[in-house]
Amino acid sequence: MARTVGSNGARTEEAIRKAATRLIARHGYEATTLRMLSQAVGIQSAAVYRYFASKQDMLRDLMVQHMSHLLKSWEKVRPASSDPLQQLVGFVHFHVEYHMDRPDEVFLSYMELRSLEPESYRVIVDLRRRYELILRDILDRGVKAGQFHVADVKVATMAIIAMMTGINVWYRARGRLSRRRIVEIYTRLVLDSVVSAGQRMN
């Protein structure tokens, strides 16, 4: 079998990560075998164990990497203003664009939670909770400031994130709407759900 990458180093590890993400998103965790993965990368099956102790460890690592990058990326772009309305708009823009760019990572992170062993599951759920708390804090501050009106901040947080993350199911880069227009629509949907008409940003 011809090798497409070297058998050692960061380059091979990154190739394994990308191939694993793609294969699991297409076939599911249970159906994705190390043989399929090694063939996709161009290495011997045993070489995968140089980078990941097990298939389960690989899944956990992929999910941790995704969620950690998501959290760090938000910190880089979050609005400097402490105004809840501006922060909410910034969060929506960030979330929608980030998820449009990473359909396989998002699909894996949400759909394969069921495949994680208990300890790994708790690690990923904790990271997801940290991300959800960002939006929850924005909404909570907006409610206290009289800018937002929601029946329950926790429920609103989960509903908004679920709605925005669902873009992964249908978005196509060459679809009818531009990325900018999609972001605008999602922003309006979110604002319409929490902000009174007199307080909305144009």
Image (cartoon, rainbow, N blue to C red):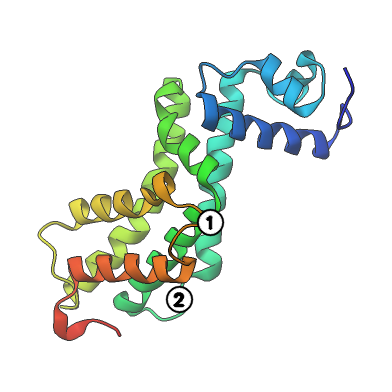
Circle on res. 173: 1
* Nearest to the observer: residue 174 or residue 105: 174
What residue is at 41 percent from the left and 67 percent from the top? 183
Q: Amino acid at mark 1?
A: Ala
What residue is at 61 percent from the left and 26 percent from the top? 58
Q: Nearer the viewer, mark 1 or mark 2?
A: 1
Residue 13 lies in quadrant: top right
- CA separation, marks 1 and 2? 26 Å
Number of marks drawn: 2
The reply to whether discs 1 and 2 touch (Cβ–Cβ < 8 Å) is no
Q: Amino acid at mark 2?
A: Pro
Residue 63's x, y, as percent?
53, 37
Which quadrant holds the C terminus?
Answer: bottom left
Relative height, residue 172 to residue 142 (above, below): above
Which quadrant holds the N terminus?
Answer: top right
Q: Secondary structure at mark 1?
A: loop
Q: Is residue 71 left or right of residue 200?
A: right
Residue 172's x, y, as percent?
49, 52
What residue is at 36 percent from the left and 48 percent from the top? 166
**Residue corresponding to mark 2:** 79
Relative height, residue 157 to residue 89 (above, below): above
